[in-house]
């Protein structure tokens, strides 16, 4: 997968530019410095975003990485299903009522971080929380990924072990689990010497695009009780993606979830 993704990214620009698009309905699209429209600093990264569902999406993938991406996505999807079930079990949910069993792979991003001439003034990926339920991440051996460790109150390296996958809990799971599972803040350093690659596969509850703007997500009913009252109010995907909040770079640690806390109004006054 990594070799083919690298071939895609290292092609001349003219061969990649046909995929350049900000149209989110396009099944394979190439962007540079994602997040740039919403932050003051660019991410030093090129990304091929693949939307693997529905299943005909593979016909839209660049031929250079189509076969390997299709196989990879199939395997990651199976792993995601197993993980969903394990997470549901860990939360004590019953298969008929939990919302993770049907969690599905919505986007797979082939990230390519070119060597950066001024790594001390740039960042490969700004500190962020994924919006997903969880993310399965494949990274190469270069390193640079860090996660914020609450206990140590500091950033720690996520070592790049050959053959290992990293699983990040995202904001959706923190919301659905009523704060039982915590979203992990992470960032990536740029380096001046070698390109770095990763494949980030984002899992979300099934998204019905016809009701996307009205569907609300909130703590799963089984996880809310008198002892554990709901920590968050219900939120639309737009709220979870942060598009409702223009000032995402303020002082709040997890600005999206902080705004969704039922106690938020009290906390800020
Ligand atoms: O490249 C990485 O290791 C992390 C990428 C990432 O955090 C993301 O795509 O959300
Ligand atoms: Fe991320």
Image: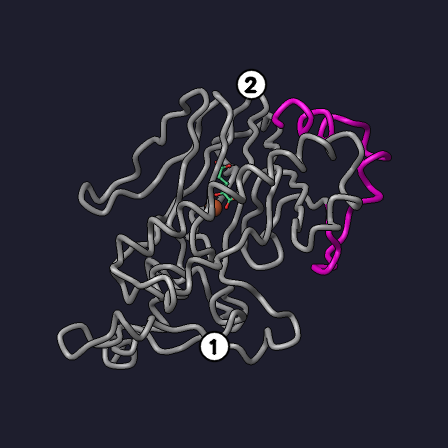
Q: Position of residue 198 (x, y in %)?
A: 54, 33
- Disc number placed over residue 193 in the picture, else none: 2
Q: Residues within 10 Å of mark 2 (few under 14, many from 20)?
A: few
| Residue drawn where x is 33% and y is 68% of the image | 258
Q: Residues within 10 Å of mark 1 (few under 14, many from 20)?
A: some
- Disc number placed over residue 216 in the picture, else none: 1
Q: CA distance from mark 2 to mark 1?
A: 45 Å
Above or below, 223 relative to 181: below
Residue extent of the magenta highlight = 1-29
In the rendered structure, the answer to whether residue 77 lies left or right of residue 166 reads right
| Residue drawn where x is 59% and y is 25% of the image | 115
When asked about the image quadrant of residue 170, the answer is bottom left
Determine the secondary structure under disc 2. Answer: loop
Residue 109 on the magenta span: no
In the rendered structure, the answer to whether residue 185 lies left or right of residue 267 reads right
Q: Nearer the viewer, mark 2 or mark 1?
A: 1
Q: Position of residue 172 (x, y in %)?
A: 41, 61
Q: Position of residue 146 (x, y in %)?
A: 37, 36
């Amino acid at each position: 997968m990594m070799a083919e993704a690298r071939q895609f990214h290292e092609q001349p620009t003219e061969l990649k530019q046909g995929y350049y698009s900000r149209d989110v309905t396009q099944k394979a699209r190439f962007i540079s410095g994602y997040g740039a429209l919403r932050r003051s600093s660019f991410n030093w990264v090129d990304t091929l975003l693949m939307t693997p569902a529905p299943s005909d999406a593979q016909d839209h993938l660049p031929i250079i990485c189509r076969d390997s991406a299709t196989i990879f996505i199939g395997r990651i999807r199976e792993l995601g299903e197993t993980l969903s079930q394990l997470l549901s079990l860990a939360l004590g949910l019953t298969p008929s009522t939990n919302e993770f069993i049907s969690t599905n792979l919505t986007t797979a991003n082939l990230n390519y971080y070119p060597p950066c001439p001024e790594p001390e003034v740039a960042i490969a990926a700004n500190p962020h929380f994924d919006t997903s339920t969880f993310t399965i991440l494949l990274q190469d051996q270069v390193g640079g990924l860090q996660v914020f460790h609450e206990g140590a109150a500091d950033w720690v390296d996520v070592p790049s072990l050959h053959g290992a996958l990293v699983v990040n809990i995202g904001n959706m799971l923190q919301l659905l689990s009523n704060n039982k599972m915590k979203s992990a803040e992470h960032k990536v350093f740029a380096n001046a010497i070698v390109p770095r690659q990763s494949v980030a596969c984002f899992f979300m509850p099934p998204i019905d695009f016809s009701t996307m703007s009205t569907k609300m997500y909130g703590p799963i009913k089984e996880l809310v009780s008198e002892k554990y009252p709901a920590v968050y109010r219900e939120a639309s995907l737009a709220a979870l993606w942060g598009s409702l909040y223009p000032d995402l770079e303020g002082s709040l640690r997890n600005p999206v979830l902080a705004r969704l806390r039922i106690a938020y109004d009290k906390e800020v006054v």
